[in-house]
């Protein structure tokens, strides 16, 4: 694991964006694995600014997001599809047909949506760079503690802790889904490189476990210790327990 500690969240966003740009300069048709949540927002905003200034193009890029809530459609402002359209896809030259999120819609067989999503990732040639955030309980994507380190893309029930952490995004708690579809830990491990971003004191314990703890399903991000090209970009606050 490469650990990069930077002063603050703005520096983490800038460095994350720089790495995405570098990849797209080398490989215009790179396959990006994308994450949602609060952490990567500033990085996406930088990439949009970079695009507007002609410093990067997504015209040939292909994207696969980590996860999506079950039951929230693309038009729902809380869905991750809506977030990605609003923060990145609608503001750059990426082709919408090249952007993918796992979806388990009404009538879909929950057991088949994961394998279908993984087949699409393989057909695109696999993920070149997987962006990740981390939950306070060490989850990556929606792979909650106790998720098998061999898990694949599947439907998962969210833990109470994750529901509480993410409740800030929902005005009406009744509308917060309790089920999501997420790439598995083994799926994430297959990316050629992973780049995990973490900022703020609230992530310090999860960051400490991820880097210094034993590999364990109780802290899913510890699986990244086994990845050959994993980079962790953190600010001073997230690094405060190392
Ligand atoms: C969410 C997402 C994760 C994200 C994490 C942290 O539940 N499913 O992909 O990394 O929680 O979110 P945030 O960056 O808002 O703290």
Image (cartoon, helix red, strand yellow):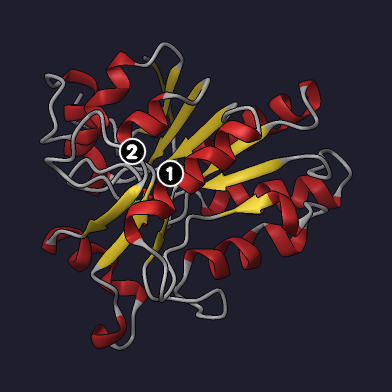
Dot 1 or dot 2: first in sequence order is 1
Percent from the top left, x then y, of residue 218?
10, 36
Label 1 sits on a secondary structure element that is helix
Q: Residue at x 78, y 20 (%)?
A: 26
Badge 2 density bin: few <14, some 14–19, many ≥20, Cα 10 Å: some
- Please name the residue that numbered disc 2 is placed on: 152
Q: Pick the residue in front: 5 or 150.
A: 150
Tell me if label 1 and label 2 are in contact, CB under 8 Å: yes
Q: Residue at x 28, y 30 (%)?
A: 239
Percent from the top left, x then y, of residue 225?
28, 17
Q: Is residue 164 above or below residue 118?
A: below
Badge 1 density bin: few <14, some 14–19, many ≥20, Cα 10 Å: some
Label 2 sits on a secondary structure element that is loop
Task: Quadrant for residue 75, please give it.
Answer: bottom right
Q: Which mark is residue 115?
A: 1
Q: Pick the residue in front: 3 or 229.
A: 229
């Amino acid at each position: 694991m490469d650990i990069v500690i930077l002063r603050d969240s703005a520096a983490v966003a800038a460095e994350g964006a720089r790495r995405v740009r570098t990849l797209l300069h080398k490989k215009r048709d790179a396959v990006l694995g994308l994450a949602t949540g609060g952490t990567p927002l500033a990085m996406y905003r930088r990439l949009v600014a970079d695009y507007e200034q002609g410093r990067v193009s997504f015209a040939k890029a292909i994207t696969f997001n980590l996860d999506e809530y079950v039951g929230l459609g693309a038009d729902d402002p809380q869905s991750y599809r809506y977030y990605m359209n609003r923060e990145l896809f609608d503001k750059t030259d990426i082709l919408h047909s090249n952007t993918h999120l796992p979806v388990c819609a009404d009538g879909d067989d929950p057991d088949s949506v994961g394998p279908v999503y993984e087949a699409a990732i393989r057909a695109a040639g696999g993920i070149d760079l997987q962006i990740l955030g981390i939950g306070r309980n060490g989850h990556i994507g929606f792979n909650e503690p106790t998720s098998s380190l061999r898990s694949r893309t599947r439907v998962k029930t969210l833990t109470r802790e994750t529901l509480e952490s993410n409740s800030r995004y929902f005005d009406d708690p009744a509308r917060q889904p309790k089920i999501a579809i997420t790439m598995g830990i083994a799926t994430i491990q297959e990316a050629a490189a992973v780049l995990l971003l973490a900022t703020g004191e609230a992530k310090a314990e999860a960051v400490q476990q991820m880097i210094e703890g034993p590999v364990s399903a109780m802290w899913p991000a510890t699986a990244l210790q086994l990845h050959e090209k994993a980079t962790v970009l953190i600010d001073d606050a997230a690094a405060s327990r190392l």
